[in-house]
Image: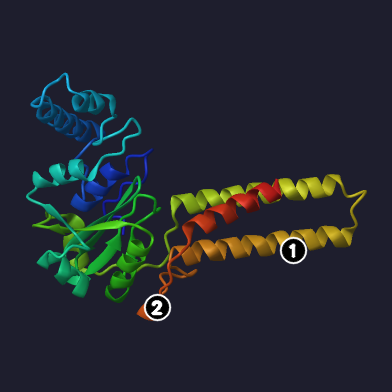
Amino acid sequence: MEFIYHEKQDGSLCGLHCLNNLLQGHYYTAVDLAEIAQQMDQEEQTRMAESGIHTDDFRRFMEQPSSNMDDSGMFSVQVLTSALKIWDLNLVPYASSNPIAVAARNNPTEQAAYICNFGEHWLTVRRMGYQWFNLNSLLTSPELISDTFLSLFLTQLQHEGYSIFVVTGVLPVCKADEVLRMEPAVQTVKPKLLSEVKEDDDIRTALAVSLAKAESSSTSTSSKESKLAATKASSEEEELEAAIRLSLGTDSDGPVEKNEGDVKEPDLEDLRKKRLAFLEKRQ
């Protein structure tokens, strides 16, 4: 799937990656989006000034940081919406009563694309050819999503707190769309999240440190106890990796397609605490 355009995470520029992955090309830079955000800030300032520049409301407004961007490169939905309007594309809230949103909830595969936001992270889900792909910039490569799993995937994102928007309008023609119409993609290797790769590295490092400490204290620790400790560490590592896969809705070979009644809301906070506790315990 090397012909699919897929920008990977760079700092906090997921909003930028989300747009370019949606449009399937390097159409925007961080400077472009920053200019849009600054223009929106100036327009908001002008509207506030109409009531007087010496009012408490105007003073408080000027003291607040920009709501359209921050120093890390995070952009608001208003900035992304403005950038998409240049392409005659619009965003419709997936959970709204808008007829387009209702149709999308009834049959998600009838739409062209979705962009999703949670806190400070944006990601794109788009159809190319006759297939759907998760173009999350945190993934090491695009993830193929079956038509059956798409509805469950969007439901899972909603349970995790994501705001989902239906992309309406005609997306730019892209090479991937043309290629995939002739030859559908096959997901041979399940892509991993970049954060998951880092977690794996942290786990390996922590285990190495733990084993080194065990060896240095071998005079006071029996061989049997060392083996038991190593077995426990391995078991905990497997348990942690299983929890990560579960939170992502995947197994070792690819997405786990569950019945709608089986979908459970993953507790990401518990997973984070468990990972941190595991690493601290291993040091």
Q: Is residue 155 left or right of residue 239?
A: left
Q: Is residue 215 left or right of residue 116?
A: right
How far across and how far down the image is residue 247, in percent?
47, 63
User: Does 7 sit above or below residue 57?
Assistant: below
Numbered label attached to residue 257: none
Residue found at x 68% / y 65%:
235
Q: What residue is shown with label 1? A: 231
Q: Secondary structure at mark 1?
A: helix
Q: Quadrant of residue 124?
A: bottom left
Q: Quadrant of the C terminus?
A: top right
User: Does 110 sit above or below residue 244?
Assistant: below
Foreground of the two, 36 or 230: 36
Foreground of the two, 51 or 79: 51
The residue at the far top in this view is 54
The reply to whether residue 259 is in sight is no
Q: Secondary structure at mark 2?
A: loop
The residue at the far front in this view is 56
Numbered label attached to residue 258: 2
Q: Is residue 45 left or right of residue 150?
A: left
How far across and how far down the image is residue 60, in percent?
25, 26
Q: Earlier in the sequence, mark 2 or mark 1?
A: 1
Foreground of the two, 174 or 104: 104
**Badges 2 and 1: C-beta atoms under 8 Å apart?**
no
Q: Quadrant of residue 223?
A: bottom right
The residue at the far right in this view is 219
Residue found at x 46% / y 70%:
253
Q: Amino acid at mark 1?
A: Thr
How far across and how far down the image is residue 282, in percent?
70, 50
The reply to whether residue 231 is in sight is yes
Residue found at x 66% / y 61%:
236
